[in-house]
Image (cartoon, rainbow, N blue to C red):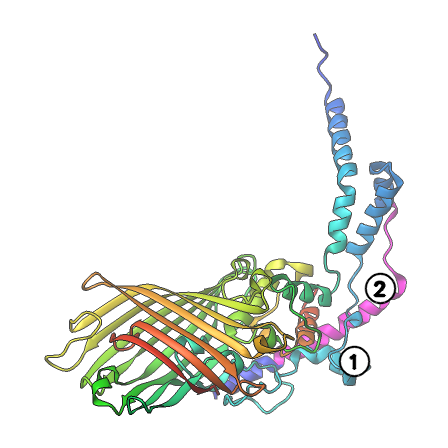
Amino acid sequence: MAKKPTAIEQHTAALKAHTAALNRNTKALAATASALPTNAKQFVYSLLQQSAPQQKFDDTTKLAALGYGTKQSQDGLAAFINLQKWHGVFIQDADVEACTTVSALIQAVAAVEK
Amino acid sequence: MFSRVVNSCVVHLCLIGCIAAQSAHAEDAKSAATGPTLSVSKQKALNALFKNDNDRAAAIAFLKKTSAPVAKSAITPVVAATKGDTTQKSTIPSTPKEANPAGFTFIYRDPNPNVKQSDCEGAIFLLRQDWNDIGFGCPDTADKATGASITYTNDRVQRNSVWAIDGTAAVLYSANFPTFQDKSSISYFAIGAYTTVNKLSNSLISKSKTNVDTLAYGGLIEFELATPADVGWRHFYELRGGGVTDNLMNTSAVSLAAEYHPVYFPWYLNRPFEPFSLPFNVNIDPSLLLEYDSITGSGQTLAFNNNKQSLRIGPQISLKIFPLNGSTGLFSRLSGAIAYHWAEETYTRRPLDWLSTSLSYKLDDAGYFKLTASYKHGHDEITGALTNLYKMGLTGAL
């Protein structure tokens, strides 16, 4: 009859399994982490590129030229930014509506970044 | 007066935001100078967890990156002229939106340049083809709108001249309100008045059955419901009420309409996107419409159901197509709109539908004037008259 493992042994075994899983997945985790935006500019660019990867724009591009010229799309963008929970950002609709250009949006996001 | 109250609130928010931004700016500079380091306990834990050196190095790099505060000063200034001007940089979010390039739209705004206010607030005058073209509060720029149209066609073979006017003008007064992270709230409210003119006149008497001469007018309110931050929906509602006069049928009717438009970016509702790597953006706006009409004259009926009253309910889907930013050639000047509305007439259980399409080629860079081809088919949204109409002409959007 097999000896029943003690609580310590069970805990150690679980820890070993967990460590092995971490070792297996570290590279993937690190790769994912490195792909995450680290500043407001990367964050805003990643959101705008998500739905239109071929679209060319820079900091001076007007948001209306990218399709964010209506109240519905601007408020939707504010809600989408808030939904990401990136660096605790919670932005008001009016702040996004007040942004004419991509750079203004970056600055607005940076201003509420935690 | 109300606008002044709203504006003064915005000024206070702006001042708080500026102070916070400047404080954060100083902290960023400090942390950027020292650089992020991992604590001894974190390093010991990593050494115990990762036997492989490469894996351990990757984990340390990851932790350093995620624990490092973001230096806001690293963000590119808006324009070169503001470089080095810290006041400008930290208050840029509060800079009022610059004049809309498609800016014939008349907007009342506070003249104070430090007041943060969007183009969607205050009094605004709109001129577009119909309600699909107007949208909510802040309309799309003129280059993406179909616009009101005045057309003249001279058919020399049939000796028929056709004049047509088709457009909706509206005046809106709107205000934004704060949204909250953890609860739903009304984030936008607007009141306004509108008039819609739809007139088509043939000089040839045999073609007079296609003549149209309607005038609709009334008032409207709009509001937006914002859900909590982790839900991410925006719900737009519009209620319109007024009269419709058909000068050909000599009828007049009372009209009430309610519209609901959801916005949710994860499902691409009202989010511009590039479909199948094609060189244009598409915006999908689904909605639900409830429309009621009641004829006011005696012995007359509505074209929707040949009754004195009509109540219609049904969904509508609108698509707007416009070029990707930076595109060149033909596609850069083309834009289109398709709206299809299906409804059930509840008094007669009769299905009705309405298709409205247009394709425009902008003549000037801002898109104020366009050559537009349009096709409308089905029961007219305003009068219920059966319509099958092709048009091509010059349109203008303000």
Q: Which mark is residue B18?
A: none
Mark-to-mark CA distance, 1 and 2: 18 Å
Q: Considering only vertical position in the picture, is A68 above or below A53?
A: below
Is there any visible trace of residue B276 in the rendered image?
Answer: yes
Q: Position of residue B278 (x, y in %)?
A: 58, 65
Packing grade of label 1 (10 A; few <14, some 14-19, many >=20) is: some
Q: Which residue was labeled with disc 2? A: B31
Q: Chain under label 1?
A: B
What segment carries the magenta color? B12-40
Kindly identify the residue that appears in the image at 81 percent across and 68 percent down: B27
Image quarter of residue B203:
bottom left
- Of residues B299 and B60, the one nearer the viewer is B299
Q: Position of residue B117 (x, y in %)?
A: 58, 82
Q: Position of residue B176 (x, y in %)?
A: 51, 76
Q: Considering only vertical position in the picture, is B257 above or below A28?
A: below
Q: Which residue was labeled with disc 1? A: B86
- Tell me the amino acid under the disc marked 2: Ser
Q: Earlier in the sequence, mark 1 or mark 2?
A: 2
Is A34 positioned to the left or the right of B250 in the image? right
- Of residues B32 and B78, the one nearer the viewer is B78
Packing grade of label 2 (10 A; few <14, some 14-19, many >=20) is: some
Q: Is residue B38 magenta?
A: yes
Q: Position of residue B372 (x, y in %)?
A: 45, 82
Seen as rendered, the residue at the extreme left is: B299
Q: How many marks on residues?
A: 2
Overall secondary structure of the magenta stretch? Answer: helix
